[in-house]
Image: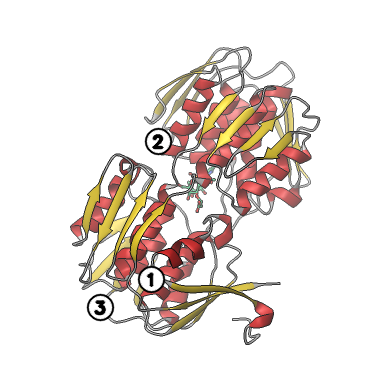
Amino acid sequence: MSEQLIIHGGKTLHGSIEASGAKNAALPLLAAAILTSEELLFHRIPHLKDVSTMLSLLVHQGADVSINEGNQVTVCTASLTKSEASYELVKTMRASSLVLGPLLTRFGHAYVSLPGGCAIGARPIDLHLKALEKMGATIHMEHGYVKAIAENGLHGAHIHFDHVTVTGTENIMMAAVLAKGETILENSAREPEVVNLAETLIMMGAKIEGAGTDRICIQGVETLHGGDVHIIADRIETATYLAAGLITGGDVTVTDTDPHMLEAFLARVEEAGAMVKTGQDWIRCASDKPLQAMSIHTTPHPGFPTDLQAQFMALMCCAQGSSVITENIFENRFMHVQELLRMGAHIELDGHSAIVHGGKPLSGAPVMATDLRASACLILAALAAQGTTHISRIYHLDRGYERIEEKLMSLGASIQRISQSSSTGEEY
Ligand code: EPZ
């Protein structure tokens, strides 16, 4: 049964909402449960499709998982029996490749399906595999699976990533914490989610220095112990709701978050004319007039995040003037453009750049979500558009945004989710 979102645009959003735990922190942290046979208690787990997929993967391997009250989950992998990740699960969530490093370093072997590509790009994991080979693993590809073996265990290595990879950094960091000797990661990712993982591994007994910089040094240890895992706020969700306030000329505060994780985004919207106020764990954005056009290009953290490119494009469609949005991380992350054009946006594509001519009001239309962040972009556009927008294929959305309708309704949006059978029945 497919579902749609119906949004009546033109409502100005006001109010305050709480950020959820970060999807892109929760996924590697759950994979890290494989590194210890003691129990981990996860706080602030977001209830998302991708998270339940990762939990199913762990259960399939033999882990004990219990979903507690609120957003708490306990995971214990003492009884792990399988060191594999099946295609059925990996094809629905490419971040399943994050179990490769932990399985290999704990068991000396792993059999993990190669993640398929996805809408936004080929998404290979060649850099993960090259690093594991340098650490002593032998890697074979067979029937779409990665068969990795390290009979004598993994050993430390000096690894230089050809280019920045977030899950590559996380995968190899997890492989290195139980490897023999020292591992150095050069050109490592600096995302807050990488730091959250490193700090958790240190809590578990790992020896890691330099997380948050482009050079991380890890001394392998014998074993790791369990404990409490605190997941950081979702910075991409936070910025998405702040953008919802701005695009509707409103005033939105997001609490239980961290402004330091969003410095590039906040600097851009402030330069574009938004009022930005921050505290230790909250951010408030408001704008009672259209923003000025502002060009951006996406880069690894601390630059402008690729996961906010689509949302920022929606903002620029409603800004005064023209802006250039350049996507440097993924090769195909402009699929939201065709849908925005259906809503009356004026955008020209030129290779990795989109020239956005703002100022013309958007109009509601039937549109189709193509990937997770494109779905968020279409919601933002629909909130600002004149008239009603139907967004189909919103299963993409449920992978990364917890209770999005509830949170937007609490800010004054007119939004509802319907199942296909109760709508007019067209498949857009
Ligand atoms: C992580 O994906 C995030 N996912 C993505 O968020 C995010 O967009 C991306 O980092 C960039 O910030 C999770 O953390 C679960 P990369 P990841 O490896 O690690 C190429 C979302 O919307 N590359 O940093 O897969 C790759 O193709 C998702 O929440 C290789 O060529 O991204 C891409 O062009 C989408 N070989 C670039 O590097 C490799 O071995 C950066 O990818 C690895 C990556």
Q: Which mark is residue 190?
A: 2
In the current view of this chain or complex, which residue is farthest to the right? Answer: 81
Percent x, y of residue 325 = 33, 62
**Disc 3 packing (10 Å; few <14; some 14–19; many ≥20):** some
What's the distance in space between the residues labelled 1 and 3, CA to CA? Answer: 18 Å
Specify the amino acid type for callout 2: Arg
The answer to whether residue 319 is left or right of residue 182 is left
What kind of element bears circle 1? strand
Q: Percent position (x, y) of residue 320?
A: 21, 73
Q: Which residue is mark 1?
A: 349
Disc 3 marks which residue?
A: 359
Asked if the residues shown at circle 1 and circle 2 are in contact, with their CB atoms under 8 angstroms apart, the answer is: no
Give the spatial CA distance, label 1 vs label 2.
Answer: 30 Å
Above or below residue 219? Residue 317 is below
Mark 3 and mark 2 in contact? Answer it, CB < 8 Å: no
- Left or right of residue 140, residue 128 in this image: left
- Is 172 located above or below residue 420 in the figure? above
